[in-house]
Image (cartoon, grey):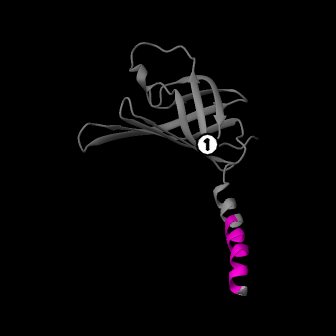
Amino acid sequence: MKKFAFLPFIFILIGCMTCNLFDSQKIFQPGCYKGTYSITHYYNTDSSFTDSGPATFIFTDTSYSCWGENYLLPPSGGGKYSIIDDKMVLNDTAPHTAEFDWTLILNGEFDYWFDGKNLRLEQFDRAHNRHHKFLIVREDEE
């Protein structure tokens, strides 16, 4: 009987320990982030194509700008952003030129992970069968 009285205590202890494992979100810090952007295009077959290149994001408290070193990878842009739970919402309001596919402009909800220095953003664009992914690191201010 004493063994069964111990069980609730063990479940509470395990529950508290696992809460900390999943609470890896840190408070987002504005600044300059550099790293890699990749986009995977899925075709209505078993094939896909991934392209990637260097990317830079600059975040202030409520706005952002982004660009890549390669032509349109990612497309340059900027606007407002917000963070809601585990989503970062980008609202691109920058003027864009007409020589590229505007469906590539980064807009909408991105799954968001931040550990205090590393930022990962991912978006599955089901309407265009694409997966956007950023793996960027906050640069230390000097």
* Residue at image point 54% right, 33% down: 109
Nearer to the camera, 8 or 93: 8
Quadrant position of the N terminus in the picture: bottom right
Residue 10 among those drawn in magenta: yes
Number of marks = 1
The part of the chain drawn in magenta is 3-15
Instruction: Give the x, y percent position of residue 39.
Output: 41, 37
* Residue at image point 73% right, 86% down: 2
Q: Is residue 101 left or right of residue 25?
A: left
Nearer to the camera, 55 or 18: 18
Circle 1 — which element?
loop
Residue reaching furthest to the front:
1
Q: Residues within 10 Å of mark 1 (few under 14, many from 20)?
A: few
Figure check: 120 above or below 32: below
Quadrant position of the C terminus in the picture: top right
Instruction: Give the x, y percent position of residue 84.
Output: 65, 36
Q: Is residue 67 left or right of residue 14?
A: left
Quarter of the image where one finds residue 137:
top right
Residue 135 among those drawn in magenta: no
Nearer to the camera, 69 or 120: 120
Nearer to the camera, 75 or 7: 7
* Residue at image point 67% right, 49% down: 25
Residue behind mark 1 = 86
The kind of residue tagged 1 is Asp
* Residue at image point 68% right, 77% down: 7
Quarter of the image where one finds residue 138:
top right
Instruction: Give the x, y percent position of residue 28.
Output: 70, 41
Residue reaching furthest to the right:
142
Q: Main secondary structure of the magenta part?
A: helix
Quarter of the image where one finds residue 86:
top right
